[in-house]
Image (cartoon, helix red, strand yellow):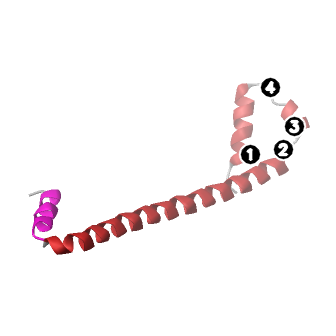
């Protein structure tokens, strides 16, 4: 039997007067999982936002418009971008 079939078999054994309570438990379980997923997404988003702010600040500090004018080829631009975004 699949898990779904096993669950269905257990549901079929629940007395009618307890189905409402069981249904509430299922809803709470689903809501708890949704809430947990939202918390994880929020934490990840905050972490990425913070990392973005840090790298933006580093790039701004290293940015020199005179130096930028010395970059002539696409390879120069690519190499400069790599250097600007390297982790220390």
Give the structural element (helix, strand or loop) at label 3.
Answer: helix
Instruction: Count neighbours of disc 1 (C-alpha within 10 A) and say few if under 14, some if 14 to 19, many if 20 or more.
Output: some
Q: Nearer the viewer, residue 35 or 2?
A: 35
- The residue that appears at 80% across and 25% down in the rendered structure is 72
Is the Cβ of the residue at disc 1 closer than 8 Å to that at disc 2?
A: yes
Q: CA distance from mark 1 to mark 3?
A: 12 Å
Q: For residue 84, which numbered disc appears in the image?
A: 1
Q: Earlier in the sequence, mark 1 or mark 3?
A: 3
Q: Earlier in the sequence, mark 3 or mark 4?
A: 3
Please state which of the two labelled residues, at mark 3 or mark 2, is closer to the viewer: 2
Residue identified by numbered label 3: 67
- The residue that appears at 62% across and 60% down in the rendered structure is 46
Q: Quarter of the image for the C terminus: give it.
A: bottom right
* Res 84 → quadrant: top right
Magenta residues, start to end? 3-14
Residue 80 located left or right of residue 6: right
Instruction: Count neighbours of disc 2 (C-alpha within 10 A) and say few if under 14, some if 14 to 19, many if 20 or more.
Output: few
Q: CA distance from mark 1 to mark 4?
A: 17 Å
* Res 31 → quadrant: bottom left
* Res 42 → quadrant: bottom right
Q: For residue 72, which numbered disc appears in the image?
A: 4
Please state which of the two labelled residues, at mark 4 or mark 2, is closer to the viewer: 2
Residue 58 located left or right of residue 31: right
Place of residue 85 in the rendered image (x, y in percent of width and height, measured from the top left):
70, 47
């Amino acid at each position: 039997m699949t898990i779904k079939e096993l669950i269905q078999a257990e549901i079929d054994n629940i007395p009618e007067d307890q189905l409402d309570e069981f249904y509430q438990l299922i809803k709470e379980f689903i809501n708890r999982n949704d809430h947990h997923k939202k918390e994880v997404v929020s934490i990840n988003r905050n972490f990425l936002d913070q990392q973005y702010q840090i790298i933006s600040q580093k790039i701004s500090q290293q940015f020199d418009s005179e130096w930028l004018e010395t970059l002539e080829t696409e390879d120069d631009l690519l190499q400069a971008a790599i250097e600007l975004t390297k982790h220390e």
